């Protein structure tokens, strides 16, 4: 095991990011588990905490098989080779994209409770998750954040496979990752405690991090 739990991973990740001295940082957690890691990073950096919510697009009849992902601004990243191999129609992609965007909006409403999104233009946007496996949803998140005009885009995760990080490198200005172990089967194998994070936990973190001026 590399990490005791997500808070342990977040504190250790925050130490690495603090050394980078990024100007005007904004920390963006990927729900659900990534928000716990992001909370520790935001506290250490004294940075605003917000959310970026990508959603997987599952294959017809096999929702666990990712054929792409969508970001909250509608940015769609599709695995074109897999889409073609499975004969997935454009109509299915569009319908599933709309369905997942509705779920993104539901979660944003639940977690933010009317709180405005933190502006990213000119900031150092730090996208944080509790780990990466294939990287499909993280790729959608990165492209959605990039479209908002940050001066710098950083991906920060405790653990990820090296080949996935290599594919994501071109989408970022910097990647901070504490460990790239092989073989890599699942993010949870590197945590002693990796319980599912609830909506309530994410909501409480976002409420606690709400600026006093709001």
Image (cartoon, rainbow, N blue to C red):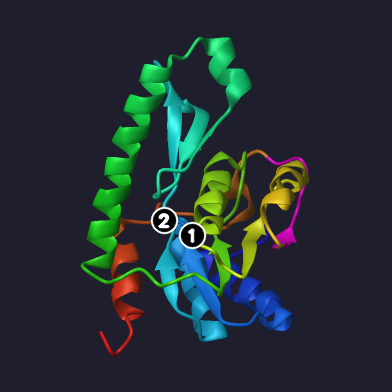
Figure check: 163 above or below 201: above
Q: Quadrant of residue 115?
A: bottom left
**Res. 31 mark:** 2
Figure check: 208 above or below 168: below
- Stretch in magenta: 174-184
Label 1 element class? helix
Indicate yes or no whether the magenta region holds residue 180. Answer: yes
Is 150 left or right of 115, judged from the image as shown?
right
Query: Foreground residue, 30 or 183?
Result: 30
- The answer to whether the residue labelled 2 contacts the one labelled 1, judged by CB atoms less than 8 Å apart, is yes
Label 2 element class? loop
Q: Residue at x 72, y 46 (%)?
A: 161
- Quadrant containing the N terminus is bottom right
Is 55 left or right of 83, judged from the image as shown?
left
Q: Residues within 10 Å of mark 1 (few under 14, many from 20)?
A: many
Dot 1 corresponds to which residue?
A: 34
């Amino acid at each position: 095991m590399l990490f005791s739990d997500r808070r342990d991973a977040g504190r250790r990740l925050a130490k690495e990011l603090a050394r980078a001295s990024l100007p005007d940082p904004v920390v963006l957690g990927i729900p659900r588990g990534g928000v716990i890691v992001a909370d520790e990073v935001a506290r250490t950096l004294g940075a605003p905490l917000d959310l970026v919510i990508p959603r997987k697009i599952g294959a017809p009849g096999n929702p666990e098989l990712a054929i792409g992902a969508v970001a909250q601004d509608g940015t769609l990243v599709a695995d074109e080779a897999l889409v073609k191999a499975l004969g997935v129609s454009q109509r299915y992609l569009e319908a599933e994209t709309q369905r997942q965007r509705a779920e993104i909006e539901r979660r944003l409403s639940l977690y933010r409770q009317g709180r405005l999104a933190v502006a990213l233009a000119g900031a150092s946007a730090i996208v944080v998750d509790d780990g990466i496996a294939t990287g499909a949803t993280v790729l959608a998140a990165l492209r959605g954040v990039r479209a908002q005009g940050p001066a710098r885009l950083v991906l920060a995760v405790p653990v990820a496979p090296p080949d996935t990080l290599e594919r994501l490198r071109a989408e970022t200005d910097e990647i901070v990752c504490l460990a790239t172990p092989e073989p890599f089967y699942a993010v949870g194998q590197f945590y002693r405690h990796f319980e599912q994070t609830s909506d309530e936990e994410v909501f409480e973190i976002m409420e606690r991090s709400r600026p006093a001026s709001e």
